[in-house]
Structures are given as structure tokens and as C-alpha cells.
Amino acid sequence: MMTEQKTSRPSLALVSGLEAISVLSSVLIVTWGIAPLLPRNRWLMSAPLFLALILTTTSHWVRRESLAQIGLTFRYFWEAVRLLSLPMMIGAALLIFTGWISGTISAHFGLLSSLPALLLSGIAQQYLLQGFIHRRIIVTTAGICRRFPAAHSPLSTLMTAACFSIVHVPNPSLTFLTFVGGLLWSVVYQRAPNIYAIGLSHGMMSLLVVNTLPPSVLHSLSVGYKHFLYQNYL
């Protein structure tokens, strides 16, 4: 299970909150600023994320967090798979049924070739979301939600899911789906912290979303300021 972090010093909670905000801001800078306004300068899009990666690795090193604590070993892998199985099957059934009703499943199955990239992307995103932001939110909120152990705080679960959905604003469908997914993955991470299992789940559910939901719901998967640019072409 997730190891509780010491929060005896108020400054540690403050620093943890600022670290989480910093990483989240790096992603928002890309989606709201660089990606829509400077689409050809791809190196600029990677710069904020690279700086965020430097921050996360440095923070892990300073706090002496092990790979097992973060969830980057295969410890708890099968426990996380067990916890994810039923919710994923229910979610997959709902998505496939929606795609069948709307007649969009057969038109999208050519996108199966994108599965490897989606799996890698899912692991990377869940590392930032669960392995860093979630862990820092737990430290920040430990003194607020005292009725629950810091490692099983419902407040931190909600805040982590909100952070994930904020990145997908203002796309309504993606904002909703990522909040629901963020809740599931955060709950599982608190009970069985394994980034690989959660990341693979993220990648597979992303593939199902893209392959089943109609374009009128997905809005070209546009997020941030790019979503408003996409609306101009409808």
C-alpha cells in the first residue's frame, strides 16, 4: 500500500502544493499557449514538460522516494489489475454500446495501430498525475482531512481527478471522462500504487474512447485554446 509521507512541518505541505501546481501549470502552458499559437515549434511544446520532469525527479531525490513508493516497480501490479478489471469492463461495455448505437465503431478500428503510443502516453501521464501530483496533494491535504489516513484521503482523490480534468477543459466530453477516469485511477493508486497497471488501463480506455464515441462528442480531442479554434471550423 501507499506509504504515508511525514507532514510534521507546515512548510512541507506548502512546498508540496506548489510543486503540484507547477507541474500542472507546465501542462496548461502547452495546451493553452504553445500548442495552439505556435504549432510548428514542437521543441517549445516539450520545453515546459522537460522542466516539469526535472522538477519531479529532483523532488523525488530530495525526499528520498523510492521507485516502489512512486509505483514504478511491479510491486502491486496484479493487485492494481484486479482492482481495475471490473470498472474497466463496465466502462468498455458502455463505450462499445454507445459506439454501436451511433454506428461509429467500424469506422474507427483502423486506429488500433495507435495502441502502443497510447499505452506509453498513458504510463507517462499517470506518472505525472499519480506518481507526483497525487503524492504531493496527499501531503498538502493531510492536515485538512484528518478523519482519514493521509494515504487514503478522499479529498486528495477528488483533487487529483480535478487536476486531470482541468487539463482537458474546455472540451466537455473529455473533461467529464477524464474526471471519472481520474477518480478511478486515484482510488486504485491509493490502494495499489502501480503506475504501469494504471497507465496501461489509461491507454486502453483512451483507445476505446477514440474508437467508439462519435466525432460530435469527441470534438477532435481538442483541449485548451485549440478547442475554440476547432469550433471555428464546424
Image (cartoon, rainbow, N blue to C red):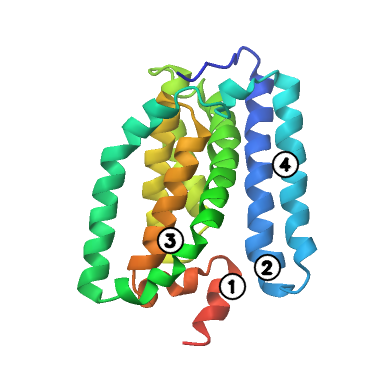
Side of 36 relative to 69 (left or right)? right
The residue lying at 42 percent from left, 52 percent from top is 204
**Inter-mark Cα distance, 3 to 1:** 14 Å
| Kind of element beneath mark 1 | helix
How busy is the neighbourhood of tag 4: few (under 14 within 10 Å), some, or many (20 plus)?
some
Q: Position of residue 62 (x, y in %)?
A: 75, 22
**Inter-mark Cα distance, 4 to 1:** 24 Å
The residue lying at 45 percent from left, 68 percent from top is 111
Pointers 1 and 2 in contact (CB under 8 A)? yes
Give the labeled residue for mark 4: 53
Which tag is nearer the camera, tag 3 or tag 4?
4
Please tell me which of labels 3 and 1 falls first in the chain: 3
Give the labeled residue for mark 2: 35
Q: Position of residue 187 (x, y in %)?
A: 39, 33
Q: Is residue 17 visible?
A: yes
Amino acid carrying label 3: it is: Leu
**Inter-mark Cα distance, 1 to 2:** 8 Å
Please tell me which of labels 1 and 2 falls first in the chain: 2
| Kind of element beneath mark 2 | helix
Q: Quadrant of residue 131?
A: top right
Residue 61's mark? none
The residue lying at 72 percent from left, 66 percent from top is 34
Q: Quadrant of residue 101?
A: bottom left
